[in-house]
Structures are given as C-alpha cells and as structure tokens.
Image (cartoon, grey):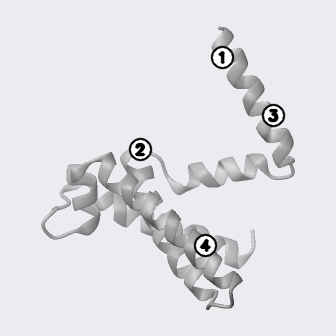
Amino acid sequence: MSDLEANSADTLNRLAAVVESRRPAHGGDPEKSYIARLLHKGPDAFLKKIGEEATEVVLAAKDAEQGADRSKIVYEMADLWFHCLIALAHYGLKPGDVLAELARREGISGIEEKALRKSQARKSEES
C-alpha cells in the first residue's frame, strides 16, 4: 500500500470515528452536532442529503465539461463521501467494508461483475 493509500484510508477511518462518536447512542447531541442531528432524524434525513450531494457532484462534473473549475467536483465529492460515511455508521458499517468490496472487485470486468450479481439474484429468487 502506498503512503497516499495509507493516508487516505487513515483519513476515512478517522472521519468514520468522528461520525461514530457523534451518534446519539454514543452521546452525540443533535443540538450541537450536525452529524448527531442527521442521525437523530433518521435515514430519511441523511439519505436525502446523499441524493442532494450526488446531484451536486453531477452538476459540478457537467459544469467542468463546459470549462468550469474541476476542483468543484472534488469539493462536492467530499460532501457526498462525508454523508455516505454517516449512512455507513447508521447501518453499523465502516469505510473498510466498502474498501474490501472494491478490492474484491479489482481486476474483475464491470460487465462480468454485474452479470454475476444478476445471476446470484436470480438464484436467490428461485430459492
């Protein structure tokens, strides 16, 4: 793992630890913490934010295609990832779970991977 990869994983893990510490179940105060407020409101609140942030990523990318500052994509993507970390925490998951899934997919054609998921879903429905 390169230094950049290790630092990136460390950054995600540190941020995930902050999110975890702000969960209302761990003493996070919805009056003082944005994270605690979103978690206290429940999935509709943070899932709505994920949708909003995903849209903002798309708009920033579309703007970049027209010559706008590409750094706006990074800014919006950071917002999206942040809100996704809140969703992961709510569901008892960690960034490492997502990284492990990405590692599992590494070297597998996206077309093959999608076909495998469809095949597994069909088998599951037949059971």
Query: Quadrant of residue 61 in the image?
Result: bottom right
If you read the primary sequence from the N terminus, does the residue marked by circle 2 or circle 3 appear first?
A: 2
Q: Amino acid at mark 2?
A: Gly
Q: Marks 3/1: CA distance?
A: 14 Å
User: In the figure, 116 relative to 88: above or below?
Assistant: above
If you read the primary sequence from the N terminus, does the residue marked by circle 4 or circle 2 appear first?
A: 4
- Circle 4 residue: 8
Query: Quadrant of residue 77 in the image?
Result: bottom right
- Circle 3 residue: 115
Residue 59 at least partly seen? yes
Q: Farthest residue in the top direction? A: 127
User: In the rendering, which numbered label is found on residue 124?
Assistant: 1
Q: Secondary structure at mark 1?
A: helix
Q: Nearer the viewer, mark 1 or mark 4?
A: 1
Residue pictured at 27% horizontal, 47% vertical = 42
Q: Marks 2/1: CA distance?
A: 24 Å
Q: Residue 6: x percent and y percent?
A: 65, 71
Residue pictured at 47% horizontal, 58% vertical = 84
**Near-viewer residue (94 or 79):** 79
Q: Amino acid at mark 1?
A: Ser
The reply to whether dot 2 and dot 3 touch (C-beta < 8 Å) is: no
Q: Residue 24: x percent and y percent?
A: 21, 53
Q: Marks 4/3: CA distance?
A: 31 Å
Q: Secondary structure at mark 3?
A: helix
Query: Quadrant of residue 9 in the image?
Result: bottom right
Question: Left or right: 8 with respect to 86?
Answer: right
Q: Amino acid at mark 3?
A: Ala
Q: Residue 8: x percent and y percent?
A: 60, 73
- Circle 2 residue: 92
User: In the figure, 89 relative to 59: above or below?
Assistant: above
Q: Marks 4/2: CA distance?
A: 21 Å
If you read the primary sequence from the N terminus, does the residue marked by circle 4 or circle 3 appear first?
A: 4
